[in-house]
Amino acid sequence: MIIDIDSGVTVSPSVIRRANPNISLPRNPSDDTLAALGYAHIQPAPRPSGDVVTQGQPEERDGVWYQTWEAREFTAEEKAAQLEAKRRGMVVSKAKAHIALHNAGLYQQVVDMMADPATDPVAVIAWNTASEYSRLSPNLLAVKDGIGLTDEQLDDLFEQAAQITP
């Protein structure tokens, strides 16, 4: 990478050639050639780790330009949005859901809940007739609450169900 020293903008050799049409610029110009034209090579720096990594503005230190990076972790809001998007995409077939519940030792608990007259009839109808279950379905969330699962446990069940081949 090359920087225009006056503007602080990174440029390509083709930009330098267009700005200096009367100069024959080699394919890989030397530091001295670039300096004479008001440019400098930017020394690469290793990319840091982090959830969000972006290239920062090059910095000059002791006459040498260095690449910089800005790294940060996801914010709580970004993590929540990612989790919500992940959950929106969690949909499994009825067979996979029932097998995952059976494997977790929860199937009979749900069957008993569906047989309880106090259970919301809409949840019972959805349980009995749906061909697939969506992670964020209000009826499914009622079942989750009824059998005492946490959101994380329900996420795990959906992930396990997705791996099942009925």
Image (cartoon, rainbow, N blue to C red):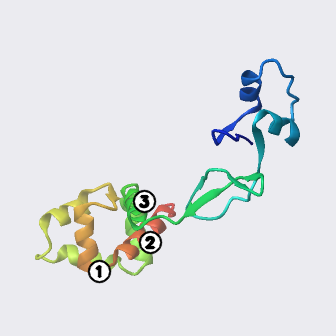
Q: Residue furthest top?
A: 22
Q: Which residue is mark 1?
A: 109
Q: Is the residue 24 above or below the residue 106 in the image?
A: above
Q: Amino acid at mark 2?
A: Asp
* Distance from Cα at disc 1 to Cα at disc 2: 17 Å
Q: Which residue is mark 2?
A: 156
In which image quadrant can residue 70 be found? Answer: bottom right
Q: Which residue is painted at 84% across and 22% down in the image?
A: 23
Residue 128, horizontal then vertical, whole percent = 24, 62
Labels 1 and 2: the sequence-earlier one: 1
Q: Is the residue 32 above or below the residue 97 in the image?
A: above
Labels 1 and 3: the sequence-earlier one: 3
Q: Which residue is painted at 29% across and 80% down in the image?
A: 109
* Distance from Cα at disc 1 to Cα at disc 3: 31 Å
Mark whose residue sits in front, 1 or 3: 3
Q: Is the residue 5 above or below the residue 146 in the image?
A: above
Q: Which residue is painted at 25% across and 72% down in the image?
A: 143
Q: Which residue is mark 3?
A: 82
In which image quadrant can residue 150 be found? Answer: bottom left
Q: Amino acid at mark 3?
A: Gln
Mark 1 surroundings within 10 Å by alpha-carbon count, few (fewer than 14), some (14 through 19), many (20 or more):
some
